Image (spheres, grey):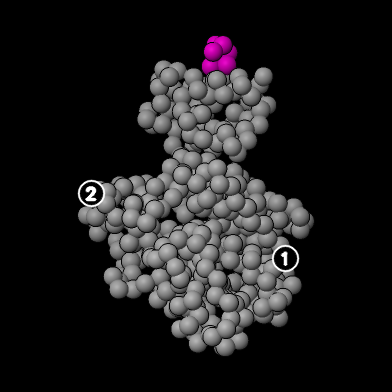
Amino acid sequence: MPVDLESRIVAIIETVSKQPVKVGPDESLFDSGLLDSFALPDMVTALEKEFGITVPDSDLTPRKFESIASIGRYVESRME
Amino acid sequence: MAFLKGFGACLPARVVGNEEMAAITGTTPDWILNISGIEERRFAAADETVADLATAAAQDCLSRCGVPASALGMVIVAGGTSGRSFPGPALTVAHRLGLTGAPALDLPIPSAGSLFGLALAARLAAEYGHILVISAEKMSDVVRRQPVEPGVAVLFGDGAGACVVSAADGPAEIIDSVIYSDGAFTEDLCLDFASPLHMNGRAVIMQATRKIPRAISEILDRCNVPATEVDAFIMHQANQNLIDGVARGLGVLSSRFYSNIRRYGNTSAASMLIAATEWSQAGGFRGGAPVVFAGFGAGFNWGALLARGV
């Protein structure tokens, strides 16, 4: 994942979670306590705004947003 | 043209506090309060059925509306815990109310079932006259199924709500409604005949947080009503955080959303009409003021309804 993309995603997670992100790109944001059910929709909204993408309802599954790496893959796929 | 004539409810007498739920789920009262915001819920007696709760709510509603049961043209009972495959509780309720010919329709739809019932009744009232919409749930049977899932079990309670939808008159006119279903998510929130309730909470919240505000905005936009001018939002009482998220999504104060989840927990389909009953007793519809009802739940099914005080 490009460094710039990763840093923008990390910045969004830090804003939504109000915590510093100290997890690796493949670690679960849920298990680490950074994201819960109610922060998740806010993060998706922030991703849409930051990257100018639209996340359709069919893609609103927690697995796609489980880690920084999975978020990065998803964002890249929507920007193609 | 259809009207909301009045509401009624039945809440079981037994109050189950978090200390008792902690014992059932192997957790602590503080943990339950922290994850749910729920302080207590009601559990029906072992021999009390969904039809019993539904009948009591129906009688309360008819009494408040001043509508005799004999005037009903249809009965709709919504809920996901009816206890047997068929016949559903609608027939039992209709029989207990003394009805012998009026169609009695079951909607096996939890959570959003009451919203679906109101939306359907609004469209059928012109033909059937007074339609009694009831939503009733006995979630206590479900949450005690083994193995108990603490994060799910502590959320729910029992109860029933009811509403008469009338073609003739009432304190509020139903202006518009939308209902939707999407079967792509059936496995994220489901209840088999003997298993505990399965809920993928993250998926449910992600979908609900987006779909509920969208449905509400759709009817408000269609009727040229700004969200900030809505007098009250009466929503399925699933979770206070979800209610707050929907309010945020619409750009309105959370205080505009009636909430009683702290006292009753999530009573699934019953919750919206129980909330409507309490809200109406506290003042209810004001002339010309728009009020929004909304629901979301297993399926997923979701929708919204706009009414305006007359």
On the image, numbered disc 1 is attached to which residue? B175
In the picture, the quarter occupied by the N terminus of chain B is: bottom right
Around disc 2, counting alpha carbons within 10 Å, would you say few (fewer than 14), some (14 to 19), or many (20 or more)? Answer: few
Is residue A6 part of the magenta span, yes or no?
A: yes
- Disc 2 versus disc 1: distance between alpha carbons? 47 Å
Q: Where in the figure is residue B200, as x and y percent of width and height?
A: 43, 42
**For the view shown, which residue lies furthest in the front direction?**
B86
In the depicted structure, whether residue B177 falls above or below residue B1: above
In the depicted structure, whether residue A76 falls above or below residue B268: above
Evaluate whether label 2 is on the same chain as label 1.
yes
Give the residue drawn at x 59%, y 37%.
A58
Q: Where in the figure is residue B90, as x and y percent of width and height?
A: 49, 73
Start and end of the magenta stretch?
A1-7
Around disc 1, counting alpha carbons within 10 Å, would you say few (fewer than 14), some (14 to 19), or many (20 or more)? Answer: some
Give the residue drawn at x 32%, y 62%.
B141
Residue B268 is at least partly visible in this image: yes
On the image, numbered disc 2 is attached to which residue? B26
* Mark carried by residue A55: none
Give the residue drawn at x 43%, y 19%.
A26
